[in-house]
Amino acid sequence: MRARVDMDYKLVFAALETVCEDNISLLCGPSDLPYGAVATRLVTCMKQIQEHGRALEPVVASFIAVYHHYDFDAHTPGNGYRTLVKVLQSCILHIISKGRYIATNYNRAFFRADHNASEMEAYCSALCQLRALLHLAQQLINDNDCGQLYSLQDGELSSKFVQEYSSMHKACFYGRCLGFQYSPALRPFLQTIVISMVSYGETYGKQQSGLGMAALSLLTSGKYVIDPELRGAEFERITQNLDMQFWKSFWNLTESGLITGFNRIASSPVQVNLTLTVPPVPLRLSLASDNSLTATVSPPLAHWGPGPVHVRLISYEIREGQDSEELLALSRKDPPPISASQLPWVQRQPLSPWLIVHFHGGGFVAQTSRSHENYLRTWSKELSVPILSVDYSLSPEAPYPRALEECFYAYCWALKNCHLLGSTAERVCLAGDSAGGNLCITVCMKAISSGIRVPDGIMAAYPATLLTTDASPSRLLTLIDPLLPLGVLAKCLNAYAGVDCQSVQPSVENSTLSTLGRDTAILLSDLTQGASNWIQSFLDPSRTSGGARSLASSPRRTQSTGALRTTTENSTQSCVDQVEYPEGFQPLRSECLAFIRPTSCPIIKNPFVSPLLAPNNLLRGLPPVHIVASALDALLDDSVMFAKKLRDMGQPVSLTVVEDLPHGFLSLSQLSKETEVASAICVEQMRMIFQRENPTPSLQRRPRLQETYPNPSG
């Protein structure tokens, strides 16, 4: 296998060298075509690409020789070093494809010279920045112990990487090159999200009617489709110094009635979908070690005292207890829904022996069970199991430990009241993604500490297990990730830690959506316009060529080094000096500097916040943990290191790494075959938890992705 990989990378770099030479020879030769200035741009660009390629080949060789040491095991290839090489190779393959197209079509009458030059320049910029990331990763691999992916003890090294993120140019990854590393089916979605966000950013906070804001947003979204460079620069500006309320407001738009209505149409129909309010009363549960003894579980208390917990019950079929007066009395709907007893043609199913308790993702700051409802409906149908999804309080208004307290209380309430949920709770699975995956683990840790029964297993999708900005190779992806930039990640982590937080008690009747009505029209118009223009770009490719800015015409770039010269050059120089790059090379620098607050708050290192830092005694006794991660996720190394830690302790754990998908792929499960397959893997992991014959945890490894799904397209 390693010999094939070695040959593959050599072939890729050889092809890159060939395509550069072919284009340089063609463009420098005699030609009577009127492409003089464009030809000069392309020659300059191809020479820079050639230089980067020659410098990168030995670097890639050094990574390929050792990166298998950082995998979870020999059957699960996946870690941040592998990912960086994979992303680099993807960028080079795009360059090779574009270079071959230029060499073949340059002499044709309808060749769009300016457009193709701009495309090649964008990928040249991306290659330059990836070269910088590989150099930073070299420092990590040199300074860390073999097999160690995080610089947990080297605060200076992590600070250097944060400083590099603050000043490095990132706009090229959000313009023409947007999503090049992901599955092709997801790129239209990513472009629509970025266009929507930058358009929404122009109207955010303006005092206009919903109709006026929607009209303005409709006008502005078009220019971001036509001018990819403008789109990238604006998205970089927004994410460099993120306004947390803007971020929350944008992502909470996925909670709007119309969007969730679309999701419900596309997802599996369910017979039970109730929002419930669990009152804050103490619970008495039997101790796991002795059923004759009980423990008292207090309601959530942090920050503002006892308060209710909001949950959502989803069930594909109506089961006993789900239409009971006792449960319907907890419904937040007024009047309560009609019960099955009032609908004699609806047949109630017996109690299920299984139960899923779900905690949603959203960086601890955004979204609810409503925005994750699409895949929860599918899970309930596929597994024939009721699901209780917890709408925990969000940061920064409700920092740690409020969310953990609410999730633990909801879990205990579900155990005690499982008969109302349509389950006997003989087998209970905790499931969550991202922040929700973190809460699954920490709720289990809290159950162990309290002596309460732990669930029978955990399914955590791309969980956040280390809530710091410590450097790791996969965290370097935050430089290019449109869904999880480092500025966003740091804001979310600090919000959960309570940095600069002013906690306020939310009104029981006031939902996250109460102020978002007029914003919904804006997002919908942007989504429609973005999708429409994406389609039109295929039908009429000339639309994307307007407004392009080239390497040659931009005053910010020097041809010798590829560095951006900006009015902030002096202020960025201190950042540049902190990392020594090879002589003659510097990454491109941003015109907009970011301020990243270090995640230095002591709460961040609390084991119930960052379970990767938990001592063994707090993790011993966890149920089987099944982690489903993505190779292109900035949090990949969180999953790999946490799985290694549990394995080394003798705890039952499995890790599956899927390819070509971003962080948050569960919420995208209906967009592509690849995301459907990844979601199906999560379902199978939960099914194995429920169907495991021997209740004693087993260390047996789960089947590999290719064993379970030999042909994702089949």
Image: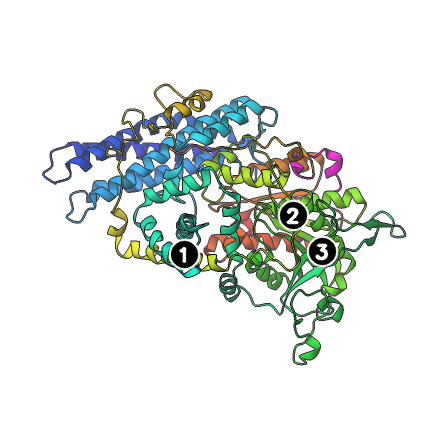
- Give the class, few, some or many, for how many residues have Cα within 10 Å of label 3's Cα (few <14, many ≥20): some
The question of residue 196 being in magenta is answered with no
Asked which secondary structure carries label 1, the reply is helix
Tell me the distance, in whole angstroms, between the alpha carbons under discs 3 and 2: 15 Å
Cα separation, mark 1 vs mark 2, equals 29 Å
Answer yes or no: do the residues labelled 3 and 2 have beta carbons within 8 Å?
no
Locate residue 328: give its quadrant: bottom right
Range of magenta residues = 608-624
Q: For the residue marked with disc 1, what is the amino acid?
A: Met
SS at badge 2: loop
Q: Position of residue 600 (x, y in %)?
A: 61, 30
Inspect this view and state whether residue 533 appears. yes
User: Looking at the picture, which amino acid does disc 3 mark?
Assistant: Pro
- Image-based side of 314 in relation to 3, left or right: right
Where residue 116 appears, as percent x and y from the top left, is 25, 42
Q: Residue furthest right?
A: 292
**Horizontal relation, residue 253 to residue 225: left or right:** right
| Residue drawn where x is 66% and y is 39% of the image | 609
Q: Position of residue 280 (x, y in %)?
A: 76, 55
Q: Which residue lies at the image location 73% right of the left edge and 56% below the top edge?
A: 427
Residue that mark 1 sits on: 213
**Distance from the alpha carbon under mark 1 to that under mark 3:** 36 Å
Q: Which residue is mark 2?
A: 504
Q: Residues within 10 Å of mark 1 (few under 14, many from 20)?
A: many
For mark 3, give the secondary structure. loop
Sequence-first tag of 1 and 2: 1
